[in-house]
Amino acid sequence: MSDIPDSPSTTALRRRLAELRGADVAPRPLDARALAALAANPGCRRRALLDGAGVDKGALAKKLGSPAAFGQSQFAFARGHAFEARVKGDGGAELMRLVHARTGTAGTPAPEPGEVAVPDLTASGPDGRAERTRLALERATAEGGWALLNHPMVRLEVAGSPVHLEPDAVAVHPDGRWTVVEIKSFPILDGAADPTKVGAAARQAAVYALALQALGGRVDERMLLVCPKDFSNLPTAEAVDLRRQLATTRRQLARLTRLEEIAAALPEGVTFDPARPADELAEAVRRLPAAYAPQCLSTCELAFHCRERARAAGSVEVLGREARGELGGLTTVEAVLAAARGEAASLSGGDGTDPSDDPPDDPAAAALRRAARLRAEALAGRS
Amino acid sequence: MSLISTLARVEAAATGRARPLTTVRHRHLAERPMVLVPLTTAGEVGAPLGALVGTDRDAPRLLVVPQPRDRTLRFAFLAELAEVVLPHLESAQGTVELQERAETDPETGKRVKVEVELCADAPQLIVPNTAGISYVRLLGRSTRFRRTAEEEPDSPHPAPARLPLLGRWLTHYGERARVPGSSLLLAVTEVLGRHWATGQSRLEDQHLGALLAWIEAEEGTSGAEAALRVELARDGDGVPLTPPAGPATDPAFDNRRLAPAIARHDAGLPGAEEEIRELVASQLRPTWDAVWRALDLLRALPPGARVADRWKRDRWSYTAHRDRLRAGEPPQPRRDDAVTAARKLAARETALAELAAQEALDDPLVMAERRLSGEAFAGEVVRVEPAWSEGKRPMPRPLVTVRTDDLPHLEEGDRVHRALEGGKSQPGVFVASPAPGLFTVRLTGGMGRGKVPEAGSVPEEGETVCWTLFEHAPRGGPDLPDPEETPWTHGGPPDPDALDAPDPVTPEDLL
Ligand code: SF4
């Protein structure tokens, strides 16, 4: 929305983020997938700042010597495209039939071919496209008919900076409702799909729905998930309730520490420009507090780097959230083993727990001592 | 996870080598299992690309689909798969033992004893990981409703003759794998993970090569480093040297190797098919070898005493499926009706409780977890007082007091159980804790029918005993087939209207 002037603080933040990214580096746009992942690990300031500043984390990880193993198979890419093209083909007739069948108001007729408006959303630049989208939604809603917005562009304010997002489609109902449509190439088999994949799609759709809500529309709290049916390439769809994802994403995006704060904690001159030498970058990254968990491996390009650091620090985070939860306040391998041996945890570096804590009174340490004793006894009895 | 297994993970992280979680093996391993390592193309969800399969680790059969989008080539692959796998799955149908079972006579409504067949063994199928199990299910689902040329002479794409049958077997094995403790179809990452703790997360343990690196590390070497090498090692094109056993291929492999080779194949260039076969084999072979190494490690562990008991249930399951096929039943439905689904769920819950109890009884290290959580206690008998029940025929009800550091969650009157030699268990009731660390239990059974307890049925002073607060056999008789395994010949034919139609054939199917 280029016609709205930026506030001075926003301009200052943008300048600061550009510095952090590197003077001549183009920002890497955030997408909904990244936002959904960000919201899944809201405690990670490292990721929040790098993503917020548009740093190419993939390039950074490579420079740090721990490249991510992400990539997309061209087969998957081709199939995804072919399927989306098929779903949207014929002026979106099949897609709108599914929109009506799964999310339409009961008892209303399905849209007739030719009855669906498909507004042109092309414009130069993301701000222009977002503006076109806003106008198209406004008009379609006012006209009170069916409309299909193919690859619209919406804006969402995240941790103090704007992010442009591109849903697969948004459908406008005659009653003025807007429904987010996501087209995925994993199958719905016998009416059920992989719950992890559906969950990821729903979190992503929730991000779009939040951005649409910011435009003041009446956004459906269900998304339409379109997938291939069984083993075929024929589309089928399910309405997926987004209320829970909307609530969590809203809460977690709000909790994302504001970028200004994180940026302010960095000394002048720090930059994440992948052109800088590796040790300088490693030092810069180290200054950003992380919150590593093994789930990062499938969601964040820096995961191998953060894992290596967490391992080197002897952090129990690397064992998984479940294990970590069980160990309570003992956060390092050394502290756990010391507690298991019955030594004072503070001697071996707990995590800032008060050294005057009396270990025998700590229930976690007492349980560990008993666990270690029982385990040793059972292993010793082994023939 | 329990605190003890978390501690084992921490120990592993500290030493760089996996640590044991058990002292015995808790799953059945057949003498001659069939290993199946499937491979699918990333993106074309479920479209088979190839497989290594067989019972001889030195001579796997390589099956390859040079163009996964070609239905004819996929059918050829599936036909070949049926040719290799079906003889294995059918191999144990003929050798049976007779078992007695109580059944309700349909005419008189009385419970009568009948003799039924139980297959003396059951064929085992092993896949690398849980995704492999899901893929077995998917293959079963996609093939069991297919129509062969014989069933549908006019079909433009008839399925290979034995394919629907393979689908029904794979479906059965896939369903059975949902039952805790069952061993007809095993994923080695799961079985290894049950027996060893690594110093990484469960998520990373899904990579069979990395998991093995932790376990196989020799004294003085770092499994952690070896696992990292396995996980990260890639060739100049970024193709992983030890792929994580998929079954989906690695994107770099797809883009750099497979796609150009398939393009050459599509263009009809000579040698292209051979090239694809070699590529597919290169991705499968490391996993194939890893699965067999994993089986070696597991075989080196002595089996738990109650493993054979659970394997017998697998044999019942196998026999029941055999009987359903013989009775000409239709393929398993796409979706279970509500009653069947509820029954299966209940059966799985029982199986889970039973598995937890049996593993603890078979293995002091597993029992240690239950002791830590207050569900069991073990210690030395410090006093035995003879006592009898009141009534006309007094029965022995001795009081046994043990000393223990364990902290059982006991209240007066709680039932406790103790395993006896020979697999039976003895009930007792918690009476009181006369002093800290002392617990008194009144034995209430398992001492014979006389006024004097049978020899050896009451622990003696100085003996070490272990009481559990959980039951040892949380279900009925050990020899009954699971409810879902009851053949319909014993319960009437299914509703013919409920039969599922085959999937429609479209030009762009994946499987
Ligand atoms: S990998 Fe590192 S930067 Fe990325 S989310 Fe995890 S901890 Fe944060």
Image (cartoon, coloured by chain):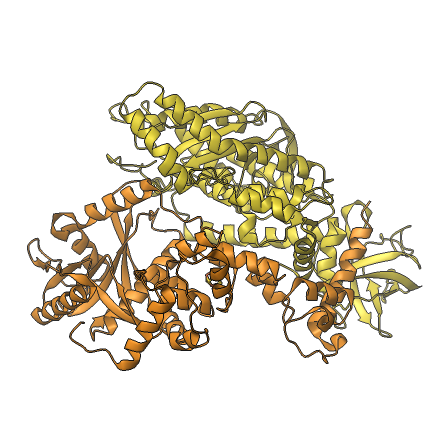
Chain colours: A orange, B yellow
Q: Position of residue B172 (x, y in %)?
A: 49, 38
Query: Could you say which quadrant of the image residue A202 lies in?
Result: bottom left
Residue at x 67% of width, y 38% of height: B297
Question: Is A236 located above or below residue B433 in the figure?
Answer: above
- Residue B277 located left or right of residue B430: left
- Residue A263 located left or right of residue B127: left
Query: Could you say which quadrant of the image residue B469 lies in?
Result: bottom right
Q: Position of residue B122 (x, y in %)?
A: 59, 32
Foreground pick, B473 / B116: B473
Query: Which quadrant does the C terminus of chain A fall into?
Result: top right
Foreground pick, B480 / B27: B27
Question: Is A232 located above or below residue A126 in the figure?
Answer: above
Mark yes or no: residue B477 visible. Answer: no
Question: Is B382 located above or below residue A98 in the figure?
Answer: below
Foreground pick, A152 / B29: A152
- Residue A152 located left or right of residue A201: left
Foreground pick, B177 / B287: B287
Question: Is A302 located above or below residue A220 in the figure?
Answer: above
How many badges with numbers are in the image?
0
Q: Position of residue B128 (x, y in %)?
A: 54, 39
Q: Position of residue B185 (x, y in %)?
A: 55, 39
Residue at x 44% of width, y 48% of height: A69
Query: Which quadrant does the N terminus of chain A fall into?
Result: bottom left
